[in-house]
Amino acid sequence: MGGWRRATVRKVTQATPNGVAVRLEVADRVEHLAGQHYVVRLTAEDGYRAQRSYSLASDPSDPRVELYVERIDDGEVSPYLADALEAGDVLDVRGPIGGWFVWRADTPAVAVAGGSGVVPIVAMLRTARVHGRSGLLRIAVAARTLRELPYAAELDAAGALIALTRETNSTGRAAHRITRSELEAALVPGATYFVCGSAGFAEATSSTLVELGVPASDVRVERFGPSG
């Protein structure tokens, strides 16, 4: 991982109504694994610093690093990144970070995510595609609406189960949360299960998986949420 590095912003895309995808060129970059994250640090003119962690959406073979930033209205970092960041800006970043919630596309995996928790799952999806191993990965994701789901079109094209709680999904399924039966249908013997989302989502999903017979040791959980 090493210390802080300079990253030049190459592209900022409005990915959802409340979030942006940021493409970075990182100096002396260390290759990452799908599921890892970066810390982004901002320094104010008076020297005050604030930093937050953001999951990587890019696969390791991508020459640039891609992060998804969801705007938190009272946040110290995300409003600037989501509203003011432009191509050519320079950021301080540190990473990649994380060794538990990672997938190398060499064993079966089932990924279940809610909201912006889909971002590390997208990195897994892209990694599987690069290695020609998409068949090793099953994905189920949840969001309020399709517009609010990061990388919705990419996930849909990959055949991910998409549960929307406030509208009908692309298959015509009425608004609903990921059900117990849908999780049961996604089970794969010997797979590693990656669960990412809010604390409530992660707790409920991981508990259901264990109730369905998945060994707790095979469930890897990443919780996210606003930090103080």
Image: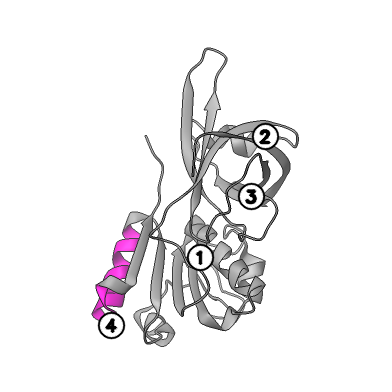
Characterize the magenta stretch by its predominant secondary structure: helix
Q: Circles 1 and 3: CB distance less than 8 Å?
A: no
Measuring from the top left, give residue 124's x and y in whole percent. 54, 67
Q: Earlier in the sequence, mark 1 or mark 4?
A: 1
CA gap, disc 4 and disc 3:
36 Å
Task: Label 2: state its secondary structure.
Answer: loop
Q: Is residue 153 visible?
A: yes
Q: Earlier in the sequence, mark 1 or mark 3?
A: 3
**Residue at image mark 2:** 85
Residue range highlighted in magenta = 200-216
User: 203 or 217, which lies in front?
Assistant: 217
Q: Residue at x 53, y 61 (%)?
A: 34
Q: State which mark lies toward you, 1 or 4.
A: 4
CA gap, disc 2 and disc 4:
44 Å
Q: Earlier in the sequence, mark 4 or mark 3?
A: 3
Q: Circles 2 and 4: CB distance less than 8 Å?
A: no
Q: Residue at x 45, y 62 (%)?
A: 102
User: 2 or 58, which lies in front?
Assistant: 2
The reply to whether the magenta stretch includes residue 204 is yes
Location of residue 20 with respect to 157 vertically, above or below? above
Q: Earlier in the sequence, mark 2 or mark 4?
A: 2
Q: Residue at x 49, y 50 (%)?
A: 37
CA gap, disc 1 and disc 3:
32 Å
Q: Earlier in the sequence, mark 3 or mark 2?
A: 3
**Residue at image mark 1:** 166
Q: Are there few (<14), some (14-19), or many (20+) residues within 10 Å of tag 4? A: some
